[in-house]
Structures are given as structure tokens and as C-alpha cells.
Image: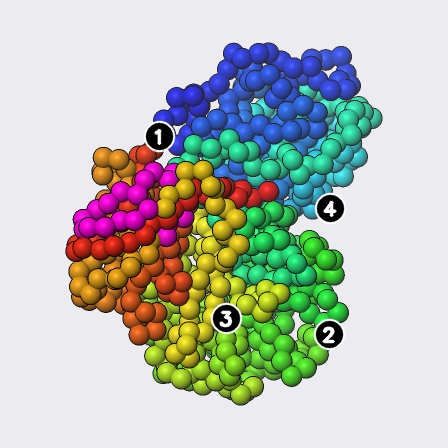
Amino acid sequence: MRSFAARAFAFFAGTVSGIGGVQPAIGQPVADRPALDWSFEAGPDRETFTTGFPQPDFVPGVTGRAWRSDGFSSSVSAPLTLSATSGFTASAWVALESYPSGYETPVADMIPASLMQQATKNDGFDIYVTPFGRWGMRVSTRSGAVRVEAKDPFPLNAWTHVAGSYDPATGTAVLYRDGVAVAESSARRPAPLRPATAAFAIARSWRPAPLGVFNINGVNGAYDDVRVIGTALAPDQVARMADAVTPPSARPSLTVPASRFAADLQRPRYHALPPANWTNEPHGLVRRGDTWHLFYQRTPNGPYKTLMTWGHMKSDDLVHWTDLPIALYPELQTRDFGFDMKGIWSGDVVNGPGGVGLAFYTSVNHSPNFYNPGISMAISEDADLLHWRKAGPLIDRTGVADFRDPYVWFEGGEARMIVGAALGGSGGLAYYRCADLADRRCWKRQPDFAPFAKMDIGSEIWEMPVFEKIGADKYILEVNPIGGRVSKYGDPTTRAVYWIGKWDGIRFTPDDVTPRMLDVLPGHLSPTVERDTAGRLIGIGIVDERRTPEAQLRAGWAHTFSLPRVWRLMPDGKTLGQSPLPALEKLRRTEGAVDRMVAGNGDTAIGDLGRMAEVEVRFDTPAATGQYGVTLAASADGRERTRLYYDADRREMVLDRRSATLATDQEGPQVQRGAYDEAAFGKPATFRVFVDHSVVDVFVNDAAAFSFRVYPTLPDASHVGVLSTGPVSARARAWRLAPAPIG
């Protein structure tokens, strides 16, 4: 291991020592000096900080400073010597943002995370927590293992004083929460401890849980005042330790420090995304009054996908977002079973009768016959949708080969639901109606929603459907086909498609069964939609990574959301038009703005706008032949650059990423071509491009849209320009944009 100051491109950092000494303990209850005492105030003493980032994270603590773990790469450890006959007391203030991740397996096969431990398989002690919030302690003795487990789940989003003790003289193990014993071993005979020779560690289990290149059983939270004392304290002594301070709100302590990603050249700054780690499909975009809420797939513990939760953020303008606590997470109803124990998969959130929030989601478990998969419902009765009560499963996949991702609306005094489905021979939808939401059994399967076999593109299943009125008598059905002949980098490639057609309240009839591409080029998926106060339909999707898992591991985060798009029906009555949300203009900075005419051919530089920019190039007379467009994310020496242009001869939009990065971890085709519909969108005259580090959103003629990822490595790869193979005249305007960090 190397020092975090010398991390360079290595993933893990190493030992940091000799910067200060042992800090005084808060409310020291006994005269004995702790064998280990970390307050994180002045820096490390004997401890080793391990992290995948340039430096350890420090945040506000119960007093002074605390250490923030990232959930997957970080831990703190130090040598510790315990006596077999004296026992121990280990304690810490801990605030968890989320429960740890784990394998999507039955409970018996999961590997818990360790809040703190000095253990091997047969030695030492381990205070652990599981992906479902169960927590306890295992102590290894010469007479076998002693185990105690708390009855109630570990608290989230609050500072909690955790302590565990073992007295070899009586063979008694006690687990404490906030100074109160919550579990104690039954009477035993004396049994010496079997001390472990391994280091004592927090936020790292003695037994890792590998998943590809990741380890998935880290701890995502904050620690303060970690101590190990070489004797078993009495209950009143532990209580005095817990009562010595009144813990503050844990929210500042669980906020990811800006320093974690400060040097990351790829992380977006004005696109919505979680504060750290993994995100997947956004869904459940719902407006309550003037406030927008976005629910989304999230692994809060690392940049990988397993045991998904529902993240939650809100906004007043769809530009600036506030992060909120996790809305839904997998749970158990019995000792070893829960109807959504494999994860909270995608779905929809709507405003229900009486103003309650209703979340419909795909729940999965390990039962061969109990709603696996199923569509479940949760209810929120508070204005900010912070607290949810699960109502349980509503329907199972009877009648289809597989299904997931419900979309719900109200029509004719009842609730309607479509669910992405595998029909055995093609992708499609399962369709249901419910006249009384108070009755979980009200949902009744309906005849086919549309002629799926004629509409499909060779997929196995459709995901994330959207169904909305888009014109006076027109509706849009949008889905994301996957599987079968469809793959991320194949032909056909994974991307969102749609149909425009008529709806008679029973069946959707597309005007043309051949699907249209939501985006001109692939890269943007699974949009969620909601109407604003003016009735406009707003969509936000995911712009997924196009780099390796190893790169995502080094980054500590994966995927981002697109900029919000305004959807509308084009004048031809059969094409969806998409334009950027007008509120994005508030990000423009006036200083350094560019407004100039460009004439001639070849490549013409516009300027260095930084890694957060909006560029608008309006061609006075679009070329009838040849190529014209923009260059972006270009270095001054030209070693890195991305070219985006229209091929007028082939009527194709072209993305050329062959020189986009000097790194070797970019994935996918380096040149992409997509058919462009001049009849619907008009000949490309205006390119409006939003660049935010590694994500780019493009709007052509404020009608055609697409988003993609690029990963330039050079610090000055932030130049933009105009390109053409023939004479052009264009007006170029460009602005540096302000960051809109998640608050």
C-alpha cells in the first residue's frame, strides 16, 4: 500500500502515520487507558487509512471531526493486542446512510459487513450488520463462538453509539445501542477469548464479498470516537460513555465531501446524479405542487449493481437538486424471507387519491411461487414523500414469461397499469386495470394493450414503458427493448423506441408498427416523464457508462441522468420532438461568453469554454453535401477531440470518438452513425450542445436529441469548434456553465 499523497493512478492508498498522537477520549469512564482510541481530530496515530480516492474523507462528527467511509473501498485499521483472560469493550459512534450491499442470494448465503472487527473465521470478535439491517456480535472463545443479535434493525441516518463487550470470567457477551443493552448471551461458564492476530478494522469485514472487480460488503457511513478497551466494562460504564455527548444531526456527516471527487475530470457537475456510487434508471418523476421528486435505482454502497434501493432527490426547477434519504430498500418480513428481498427494481410514482404518493415497483425474491417477480405498492402520506409504508405485492407474472417496470396512470375513474413483459416470442406489455386501490386484489389482467409481435424488434423483453397523451388525439408509447437480438453494442443496439398512435381506452393502435428511435444515436435510455404546470411533458433518462468496470471502480461512481427534455409532437403528427428545458439557461455565465461568426471550411476553433459549457452553432445555409458540425472536448494540441457532424450525403448524424481519449478503458464503437429524418426535423441548421465533463447532450434544430459519454484525460481537453468539409457560414454562441451540485 502507498500513501494517499502518492496515489497517482493506483486504486488503493496506504498507511498514513506519525501526524499527531492519541486523542483524549470523551467522557472516559474508567481509568484504564484504551488499547485503541480514534477521534479523527488531528490525524492518524497508528492507524492505516485505506481508500480508493486521493485522501480519506473527513466530515463533521458527534464532536469535532469524524471519518466518512465510502461503502466499498475505504477502511481504517491498526494493530491491536487483546488478552485472552481480560476480555474487551469495543465502542464507536456510527451513522449509516444505508445498509451494506450483498449478494442477491438467500439470507444464509449472504456475507455481512463489519461495523468493527478484529477477527478471522475462528478468532477474535466481529460487530456486524447485514443488508437488511440486522446486526449483532460474534465472539470466538476457546469453548466455541458466542453470538448475540439485536432485535431491532440498526438505525439509518442518525448517530448511534454502538458497543460490544465480552467478559471471559463469565463467558458473557453484551451488545449495546446508545448505552442500553440490546442483546446478551445466556449464562455460560468461563471461557477465555481467542484473540485474533489480524489488525482491528472498521468498515471492512474480515471476510470479503467479491463481485467481479468489486467488493460489495463495505460500510457506507461515518465513524467517530472509536475505542477498544482491554476489559469488559459494566453496563453503567457503557451508558456513561454513550451519555457523555448529545449527538447532532447525522445529515452533515453523511454528506459526501466535495474533496472526494474534486480532481475527477469525468464526473458531471450540473447533471443530476447521486452524491456517489451507482445509479441506474430514473423513474417516478413526479411533481407535487411546485416541487419535483425523482426516484431512481441506486446502489448507495459502491459503483456496482446489486440489491438495488430507490434513491430520492427533489428540485424546484429541474436544474438544482437536493439529495434525500433512500426511499425504499429491500426488507425481510420473516427470519429469512421478504417479498422484495432481492431488490427494489424500477417502477413508477404517481399522485394518488387524496394527495397520497403511490409507488409501484418491481419486487423480486427467492420464492418459486410467491410474487416472484411481482409488482408491489408503497404509500407515502407526507408532502415531501420521505416516509413510505409498503402495502405489499399486487400482482405476479401470471400469463407472461417475465415482467418488470410498471407504469401507472388514472383514467375513467380507475387506475391503469402497463408492465414491461417477455411474452415468450417477443417483448411486449402486460396490461391491468383496478377500480379500487384500497383492494390489493383489484388488479385484473386485460387483453393485449397493442399488437406487440408486429411492433417488436427481436427483443426478449421490454423495459421501462411510458404511455402519455402527446397531441389532441395522439398518444406516445415508449419502451426499452432488451435481450434476444438486442444488445448494448450490437445491431440492433439497446436503445429507447417509441410509437405514435391512437388510444380508445382499451387498446393502443400505432399509426405505424415500425418503431421510431427516441434518440438519433444510442446512449440515452429509460426516460421517466411528468407534466409541468403548463402541461408540457418533461423527460429525464439515464446516460450510461461507456467505460470498463475497472474504470468505474477507480472513479467510485457510475452513470448519470440526462438533462431534462421537453417532449412534443412534431407538425407531421408522427414524430416526437425534444428540446432542452428552458430553465437550463440559468446556468449560463456571462463572463467569457462567445458570440462570433464563422466562415470558411475545415476546423475553426471557438475557444476554451472549460468542461462545463453550452455551445450553439447556427448554420446560415446548411450544406447540401459534405459534412458539418462541431468539435468538442478537444485539447489544444489536438491529441484528444470528439467530432460530431451531419453527413448530408448519407443523411446521418455521426459521432466520431476515435480520438476522444488517451485512456484505454473507453468501451463501445468509436464511430457511430444514426439515420436523421430531415422530413420531420428539417435539415440540421442548429446544433445545441451541452458538455458536462464526460456527458454530452445534443439537440438539433431543438427537435432531434441524443446523449453520449466521452472521457478525455488531458486537463485542457475543453476546447470547442466548428467543423465542415465545405464552405459554411455560421454564428457560434457559447457559454461557460455554472455547476449545480446536488445539495
Distance between the Cα atoms at labels 1 and 3?
Answer: 42 Å
**In the rendered image, which residue does mark 4 sit on?**
151
Asked if the residue under mark 2 is in contact with the one under mark 4, i.e. CB atoms within 8 Å, the reply is no
Location of residue 641 in the rendering, given as x and y in whole percent from the top left corner:
26, 43
In primary-sequence order, the first of circles 4 and 2 is 4
Of residue 319 and residue 550, the one placed in the foreground of this image is 319
Task: Confirm whether the magenta stretch covers residue 722.
Answer: no
Does the magenta-highlighted stretch encompass residue 602?
A: yes
Kindly identify the amino acid type of the residue bearing the numbered disc 1: Phe
Quarter holding residue 712: top left
Q: Which residues are magenta?
A: 596-616
| Residue picked out by circle 2 | 438
Total marks placed? 4
Of residue 168 and residue 106, the one placed in the foreground of this image is 106
Residue 708 screen position, x and y as percent: 36, 53
Q: CA distance from mark 4 to mark 2?
A: 32 Å
Give the labeled residue for mark 3.
466
Name the amino acid, label 4: Lys
Label 2 Cα crowd, 10 Å radius (few <14 / some 14-19 / many 20+): few
